[in-house]
Amino acid sequence: MRKIYFLLVLLTFIGCKKVAIPEDVSITMEALPEELDYNIHVKKILSDKCFACHGNDAKKKKAGLRLDISEAAYSKTTESGLKAIVPGNISKSDFVYRILSDDPKYKMPELSSHLDLSTYEKAVLVKWIQEGAKYKPHWAFVPPSKTTLPKVNNEKWCKNDLDKFILYKIEKEGLTPTGQADKETLIRRLSFDIRGFAPNILEIDAFLNDKNPKALEHQVDRFLASKDYGERMAIYWLDLARFADSYGYLDDKHYDMSPWRDWVIEAYNKNLSFKDFVTWQLAGDLMPNTTQEKILATGFNRNHKQNTEAGIIEEEFRVENVIDRTSTVGTGLMALSVGCAKCHDHKFDPVSQKDFYSLSSFFNSTFENGSPNYGNEDMVPGPTLLLTTKENDKRILEIKKLISKLEVDQKNSFPISIVKTESDLGLGLSKKLVARLSFDKLIIKDPKKSIFTNEAEPVFNATAKKVESGIGIKGLSLKYNDETTVSLPPYKVGYFERYEPFSFSLWLKVPNNYPLATVFHNTDVERYGYQGYDFVLKENK
């Protein structure tokens, strides 16, 4: 009954009186801009003080009210009987009464949140509703539009349109512009802004002695034309693109991304269009008639950390790489912290978890492992790009033409025979055999050490330990136990690069069901992380 009585009293009070705006809030409202912008003035206040309880997070939403969506805020009727927000009418908006109230049981943000609105924040929110409570999409989704030039009092001070925006804000704050800085100060500012370091004495003297009315413009052009400009501008993009010179995990070995870094610097120096700057970095390798430069630009997607530890789960870090690329695209190109949506719908930006993984599918289609393959200091982990000069390209083209000619000549001189029978096919394959290992001729010199010989060329001996023999398909077989090992000479047999096709043929009898068992493997000891290949059984498959 007390709650009902309180609500009746509140409704009577609200229904017959206009909202009482405190004097300090009223004075602050008068000093605000003539028209408030939701993205510039309002959203940051709602995001900081309101969205935790009245935002996108369904699990923490209170009173069934959302303030991040206009339709929800306009339509929701609160327990007072009023709509949460009535555009243009603060007296009928329960939101206004609550943020201005001194009653700890009624005011918002509620006491338990340990949040409070400042006088300025209250003034902004009240005036915003008074002006119509106009919402806008996230600022990153709003296309730029030409703005009307503001009216200023001191027109003579303005030398260009940009000056009018500066002077408008100065006059709005009740200030007046200071006089123009001296030339020595100006060139110092220019140099730091455009190149990132101070001008030298010769540059300063030359500028001071230049009496041309456009001396400042000419100095700007000189700084912009220097290679230092690209280096200065590239700093911000390199930070955003998480550029580094090492792997970032474990022993943090050197990871040379300098060619991509140099491309970014050159892109600024030659004033590459923003469209190309972005497109090439995201998908330069997928563009029609792509070039070396466009493929190099995609290094943007490979600046994340690389885990080379031997014991990692490769799929785990492959996914980590995908997530990193997705989050970086969101931050760098969409102005959104999409990474929050990796685990849940974003609480403050309009990004759902489904949106995040839809975006990540672009990178998830890449065929790669979660660990790079590298060896000595001269080896670059794949995927790699051959960086050539124009002279190199010309020579490579000549060599390709020569190879094509030789292939044609050889085909004409030695016609390719057609394999007609299975025996013919076997004969052709046998010529390419690098190893034929039979366990019939096992030379047992010691119970702990046995030797058998390769029956193909080149001839080599292999060493076996803890050997037992069994009955095979043809003759004897090698019977494995927990301690059996067979070692082939390194770098003489079975040593292949990823671009070389190879195959194995063997008879294998498996007496038990093994969830995971290694039959054989070849590891390159010179490459970190046990790089190579292995032949394994998973559930006997």
Image (cartoon, rainbow, N blue to C red):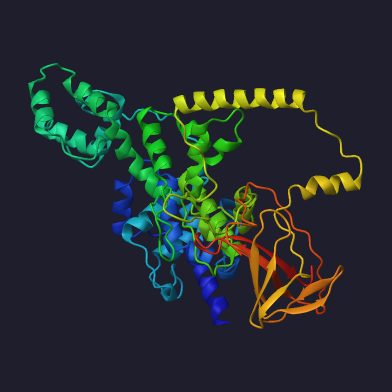
User: Where is 75 relative to 5, above or below?
Assistant: above
Say whether residue 306 is visible: yes
**Residue, x 33% and y 35% (percent of image)?**
230
As drawn, which residue projects farthest toward the right?
Answer: 421
Q: Quadrant of the N terminus?
A: bottom right
Q: Quadrant of residue 490?
A: bottom right
Front residue of this view, candidates 486 and 43: 486
Is 426 on the left-hand or right-hand side of 200? Answer: right
Is 49 on the left-hand or right-hand side of 54? Answer: left
Front residue of this view, candidates 55 and 526: 526
Q: Quadrant of the C terminus?
A: bottom right
Residue 441, x across and y down, in percent: 76, 70
**Residue, x 42% and y 60% (percent of image)?**
248
Front residue of this view, candidates 520 and 198: 520
User: Where is 209 relative to 438, above or below?
Assistant: above
Residue 208, x across and y down, in percent: 8, 25
Front residue of this view, candidates 471 and 79: 471
The mark tally for this picture is 0
Residue 505, x across and y down, in percent: 78, 59
Is 142 on the left-hand or right-hand side of 59? Answer: left
Say whether residue 183 is visible: no
Residue 174, x across and y down, in percent: 20, 41
User: Where is 88 relative to 170, above or below?
Assistant: below
